[in-house]
Image (spheres, rainbow, N blue to C red):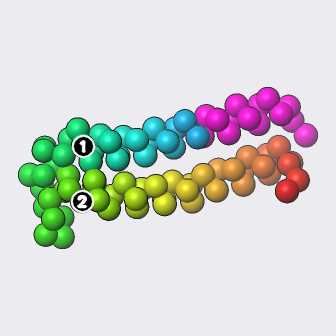
Amino acid sequence: MIDKNTYWKTNLKYLVILLSIWFTVSFGFGILLADSLNQIQMGGFKLGFWFAQQGAIYVFVILIFVYIYLMNRLDKQHKTKK
């Protein structure tokens, strides 16, 4: 079993990275870059609009599964019992 501090630092690192990705997609693509992305169409909708309405949700769900994968791997590395 490895140090708890290492485990929690790694966990927080994963959270910061994954939430930064979600923030970038939802706020950056959906709001800040929406005008630029609206020049591109996806499925009949402007891309900036799509990111604001659907893309951020899809990315969030994908990031949940990535977090589950990373935490399961971290638990195995640290031999943490559930």
Report x, y in % for residue 81: 88, 53
| Amino acid at circle 2 | Trp
Where, quadrant-wise, is the C terminus in this rendering? bottom right
Residue name at image x 40 percent, y 59 percent:
57
Q: How far apart are labels 2 and 1 at the CA level?
A: 11 Å
Q: In this view, does 36 lie to the left or right of 81?
A: left
7 vs 70, left or right, is: right
Bin the neighbour count of mark 2 within 10 Å (Cα to Cα): few under 14, some 14-19, many 20 and up. many
Give the answer, above or below, for where 14 lies relative to 54: above
In the picture of the structure, the residue carrying the numbered disc 1 is 31
For mark 1, give the secondary structure: helix
Percent across and percent down for residue 68 are 64, 56
Ranked by sequence position, the earlier of labels 2 and 1 is: 1
Residue at point 13%, 69% (across, down): 44
Q: Give the range drawn in magenta.
A: 1-14
The question of residue 6 being in magenta is answered with yes
Query: Given contact means CB atoms under 8 Å apart, are the residues at marks 2 and 1 in contact?
Result: no
Specify the quadrant of the image occupied by residue 33: top left
Q: Residue at x 14, y 59 (%)?
A: 46
Which quarter of the rendering shows the N terminus?
A: top right
Foreground of the two, 6 or 46: 46
- Residue position for label 2: 50
Pick out the residue farthest to the bottom: 43
Q: What residue type is labelled 1?
A: Ile
Work out whether residue 77 or residue 21 is closer to the camera in this orientation and state it.
21
Looking at the image, residue 16 lies above or below residue 60 = above
Residue 69 appears at what percent x and percent y? 64, 56
The part of the image, by quadrant, that contains residue 47 is: bottom left
Mark 2, secondary structure of its residue: helix
